[in-house]
Image (cartoon, rainbow, N blue to C red):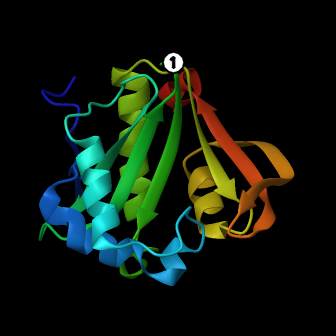
Amino acid sequence: MQPDSRELSTPRLRLRPLLLADARPLARLRDDPEVARHQSWQRYSEADADALIHNLAGQRPGTAGAWFQWAIERRSDAVLLGDCGLKTCDDPRLGELGYTLGRAHQRQGFASEAVRAVLDLAFRELGMHRVSASIDVDNLASIALCERLGLRREAHFRRSVWFKGAWCDDIVYAILGDEWLAR
């Protein structure tokens, strides 16, 4: 295990806990209407980012019933590209993924790289059995990301989620730990 599982590293990225200094750039990334389109928020303010960061303070990945959110930072210049989260369910053998990348940083493989690092942690260090992602049916980029990483489409729930004023379909992708580790 890495000395601090709150910090993950890839060839191009550093995933680290969100800091108070991240509030303004995180709010700018998340407040973009194209970025927010498939997320639970409509607008995202610096106060929202501050609240998120304060709520996550002191958390560690693998805490049952809690999300842990990493800042996705480019190693070459320390620019904040987005964030990636892993929720450890009440049964700590189960997890759920979430990720947000600023529009200027999409389609460059950063999300794949970050999510791959989080899945490695989930299965190799935290010993999870299964990790899933719940995706808006219209979020084609997120669907493609899950498929690239080997997650399997397990469910398509029709009009199952009240989302931004309308009933929307929800798609669930997942992968088992033994499948991930066998790759």
Task: Indicate the amino acid at tag 1.
Answer: Arg
Quadrant that contains the N terminus: top left
Picture residue at 43% right of the left edge, 39% below the top: 86
Left or right of 101 on screen, residue 81: left
Pinpoint residue 172: horizontal percent, then vertical percent.
71, 45
Above or below residue 129? Residue 8 is below
Pinpoint residue 19: horizontal percent, then vertical percent.
16, 54
Picture residue at 37% right of the left edge, 82% below the top: 104
Q: Give the residue at mark 1.
A: 93
Crowding around mark 1 (Cα neighbors within 10 Å: few <14, some 14 to 19, many 20+) is: some
Residue 10 visible in the picture: no
Could you say which quadrant of the image residue 5 lies in?
A: top left
Above or below residue 148? Residue 118 is above
Picture residue at 44% right of the left edge, 81% below the top: 32
SS for dot 1: loop
Pinpoint residue 154: horizontal percent, then vertical percent.
76, 39
Left or right of 39 on screen, residue 138: right
Picture residue at 32% right of the left edge, 53% below the top: 52
